[in-house]
Amino acid sequence: RLARDLSGTFGSASYAFEEMIAELGSCQIGMTLGLPCDIDNHASYVGHWLQRLKADKTAIFKAAAAAQRAVDYCLAFHPDFAAQDLDTEDAGSAEPIAA
């Protein structure tokens, strides 16, 4: 979904980058929906991303943009947000996944 590369193995740079996207997205969607958010817990993962952040000064912006696309995608299935014009590439053609 959303043309993401999920091939990285645990401990790899690409896996750490996906973790960064997931943490940023989790925090964003939690705040949007008014869910409790433990910022300290989210911040505790930053250490795992430092190598990527030091090597690529734009990594945080890339991760934040990818996280926002994921949040928009997820919110497109929420009745309170579905009618909004969210900027997603393919949320309109996707079907929700049954839990």
Image (cartoon, rainbow, N blue to C red):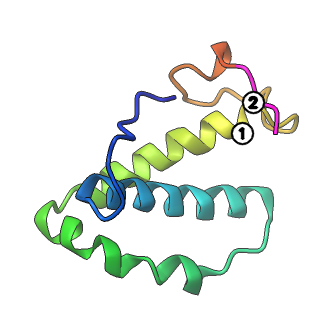
Q: Is residue 34 left or right of residue 17?
A: right
Question: Which of 47 and 25 lies nearest the eye of the viewer?
Answer: 47
Residue 61 location (% of width, % of height): 32, 54
Residue 57 figure quarter? bottom left
For badge 1, the amino acid type reads: Leu
Residue 76 location (% of width, % of height): 72, 31
Q: Give the secondary structure at mark 2.
A: loop
Q: Looking at the image, do the residues carrying marks 1 and 2 touch, with CB atoms under 8 Å apart?
A: no
Q: Is residue 59 left or right of residue 55?
A: right
**Dominant secondary structure, magenta:** loop
User: Is residue 19 within the magenta segment?
Assistant: no
Bounds of the magenta segment? 95-99
Identify the residue under disc 1.
Answer: 75
Q: Is residue 81 left or right of residue 43?
A: right
Q: Give the secondary structure at mark 1.
A: helix
* Residue 33 circle label: none
Q: Is residue 27 left or right of residue 83?
A: left
* Residue 97 circle label: 2
Q: Residue at x 79, y 66 (%)?
A: 35
